[in-house]
Image (cartoon, rainbow, N blue to C red):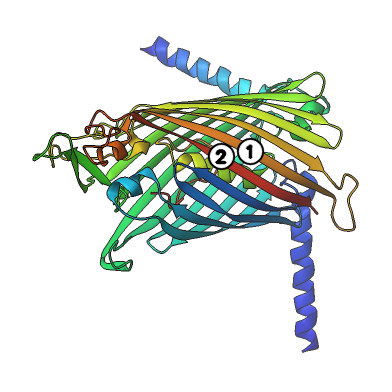
Amino acid sequence: METSARASKRWLGVAFALLLLPVASFAGVLADDRADMLYHRYDGGGVTIHGPSVLVRKKLAEKYAISANYYMDMVTSASIDVEVSGASEYKEERDQYSLGLEYLRGKTTYNLGYTNSKEDDYQAETTSFGISQDLFGDLTTISMGFSRGKDVVRRRDTVTDQIDPTFKEPIDRWSYRVGVSQILTKSIISSLQLEVITDEGFLNNPYRSYRFINPTDTRLFALAREVYPRTRTSNAVAFNARYYLPYRAAVHGGYRFFTDTWGIDANTFEAGYTHPWGPWTFEVGYRYYSQGNADFYADLFDRPNQQNFLARDKELSTFVSQALSVGATYDFLPSGWRFIKKGTLNIRYDRIEFEYDDFRDARFALLPVSDPNFRAAGTEPLYTFGANVIQAFVSVWF
Amino acid sequence: MRKTKLFSLALAALVLTGCGNIEPWVKPYERQALADPIMSFDPNPVSTAYLDHVFEAREGARGALGSAGGGCGCN
């Protein structure tokens, strides 16, 4: 017994020594131990989504790090799609758990991740692997990653409000990422990211319909279930840079180009300014996004089954979204307290405006024809809406 | 043909030697500004992940955001 205990101790000692060995040659550093508790709220277009998100990460022996995240969405939706379909407001909840592991060896960091997201009618599981390497005196960091996702789409019967046991469709997802982060000068850092994503399976929303001109009265429309292709591959490339201003403030800018096999092309521009002031840090930002519609999208089809694929999802239409953001961080524990090294209180507000070019407010064609506000299908005003997004969170470093 | 091969070989050798000899033009002691938290690309991952999700659920574009991505369940 004693011998075996001694042997175990010896093994532990060897293992411990092995753990310590590479420490001397460490060049990379893992992020600090940290916990974040966030409350988020989205309110716009008849949809309210709010809930918490908790993220904790902890280093072990300076070469491993573990992170865990719990995220929840509580949704109340009476969006324009819900109204046009004639359904009533619905509520649902989404719970998401993520777990991440990092291993640092020399200048290389390996990471593994797992995410599980659950709703009554939708489940998603994603596993990811990534590697990043510091090069050229740590001026450059290259990274590569791969994710594999498996989703299951279910449908709730709108009459009985029960999950339809006959409807169960899978989606397979693959994502490949490469990135370079580059220090350009003493005050400029930049990054270039590239990501290819392929999906295969049931890619449309099982509740959403497209609309077509009602053959019995061309001023009205009728609805039918959307039909999407079963595959989609997208490419996105993004460039971002941050510049340190001489008086301790930072400006940042970014651009992303997106294109996919459904015919959507999109451009995203972002710019922002960060200004510390005593224990405070203030941020302002602007984001401009525009996209062209998918090949099989139409606001109003001439007839049912007009083409192989039919969609009227406003996310696939031609539109512009603009967002303005303001944020403030207050460092409430600059010199720490017990085991806590630092703590911040953060608040951020984003106002997003969506303006659609080929998605009309079909509610006007649902009014009685005698109503002065009635508009014939295809002549309604274009849809537009604004959203308020609030985040309030506490962060502690320990 | 032979010239092209030689040229390619010379070019490859040049590139490889170049890689080996790249001197960091920003020395470690000159990176004080870059190490300032205000220069972080992602100072608050919990907030970034949330906002990425907000946009991804409402826009056609996706990816190249620097996160692991995928499986947002936002169909």
Residue visible at 44% across and 59% down?
A91
Inspect the image, locate mark 2, and give the three-letter code of the amino acid beneath it: Asn
Please name whichever residue, B56 or A387, is drawn nearer the observer in this view of the structure.
Answer: A387
Residue visible at 44% across and 45% down?
A46
Image quadrant assignment for residue A179: top right
Chain of the residue under label 1: A
| Local secondary structure at mark 1 | strand
Label 2: how many Cα within 10 Å (few below 14, some 14–19, many 20+): some
Query: Disc 2 designates what residue?
Result: A388
Q: Is residue A170 left or right of residue A281?
A: left
The numbered dot on residue A349 is 1
Please name whichever residue, A101 or B48, is drawn nearer the observer in this view of the structure.
Answer: B48
Please name whichever residue, A11 or A277, is drawn nearer the observer in this view of the structure.
Answer: A277
Chain of the residue under label 2: A
Inspect the image, locate mark 1, and give the three-letter code of the amino acid beneath it: Tyr
Residue visible at 56% across and 39% down?
A388
| Local secondary structure at mark 2 | strand
Image quadrant assignment for residue A21: bottom right
What percent of the width, then of the height, locates residue A214?
14, 40
Seen in the picture, residue A373 relative to A252 is either above or below; the reply is below
Label 2, label 1: how many angstroms apart (C-alpha)?
7 Å
Q: Quadrant of the N terminus of chain A?
A: bottom right
Residue found at the far left of this picture: A216
What percent of the width, then of the height, locates residue A52?
61, 56
